[in-house]
Each structure stands twice: as structure tokens, then as C-alpha cells.
Amino acid sequence: MADLFADQEIPAARREALPSENAPLADRIRPQSLDEVVGQEHLTGPDGAIGRMVAAGKLASMILWGPPGTGKTTLARMTAEHADAAFEELSAVQAGRAEVREVIARASERRKGGRSTIFFLDEIHRFNKAQ
């Protein structure tokens, strides 16, 4: 299969981070940096809230909202990577209080070592009162 973006100049560092040509299209075109995110420049741009947090290395809690496939998880992963933070992900559909507490405990240990953690809790609206 021909390279989808053959006519574009891709920097060597970016090319190494790309999934293989056999990867699904969504994986091959997924942004790898905040500069590659399309839309939401008021948040992801250098003067945006997320852009400033990443540049400063100081992250705040956020709720990312939108329909499936809009890049919420990708944005969270990129933010973690660019801020040199650990990334932990759970789905509220499958996780309970015990799993969330385990993630929080690991994050607390990392914090003692000077490293931040981004905890991405997907489908949080599906948590129930018991959770």
C-alpha cells in the first residue's frame, strides 16, 4: 500500500514515532503532538490552557467532553507524554472503587519521586453511587 501522506515532508523524529503502514488508518493519522491537533486551538495552542500547562509542566484536572472519536484519549495521552507524566487509563464501565484507589496509590508514589500522573477515567458518566 502506498504511503497515505507520501507528498508531505515528515521530520525524521516524527517518522520514527509513526505506526507501521499496516496499522489502521486512525492510528496512522492520529496526532502525535499538540501542534498536529486540528481544532480547539484556543486550548491546545501555545497560548491555550492545555498548551500553557504542558509548556510549564504543571498539569491541572480537566474534564474532556465530546462524542466518541473526537480525540479525548489522544489528547490526554499526548499531554502526559509531553509533560513527562505517567498515563493511567481506566474505564468506569469496568472499574470500581478498588481499581481507582490503586491508580491513586500508584500516582501518590510517583509524586513522591517527583513524577506526575495523568489518570484518564473514560466513561465517567457511567459511574454509579456505589462506585
Image (cartoon, rainbow, N blue to C red):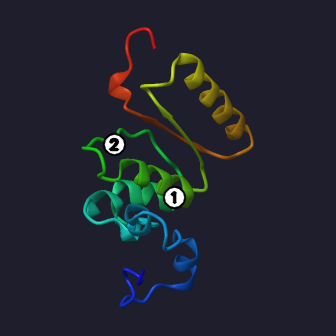
* Circle 1 crowding by C-alpha within 10 Å: few under 14, some 14–19, many from 20: few
Residue 86 in the figure: left or right of residue 4: right
Percent coordinates x, y for residue 116 in the rendering? 61, 45
Residue 43 in the figure: left or right of residue 1: left
- Nearer to us in this view, 18 or 21: 21
**Closer to us: mark 1 or mark 2?**
2
Q: Which residue is mark 2?
A: 64
Q: Classify 102 as above or below 88.
A: above
- In percent of the image, x 53 and y 17: which residue is there? 97
Q: Quadrant of residue 51?
A: bottom left
Q: Quadrant of residue 8?
A: bottom left
Percent coordinates x, y for residue 70 in the rendering? 29, 52
Label 1 and label 2: CA atoms lie apart by: 20 Å
Residue 54 in the figure: left or right of residue 86: left
The amino acid sitting under disc 2 is: Leu
Q: Which residue is mark 1?
A: 56
Q: Classify 3 as above or below 104.
A: below
Percent coordinates x, y for residue 110 in the rendering? 70, 40
- In percent of the image, x 37 and y 70: which residue is there? 36
SS at badge 2: loop
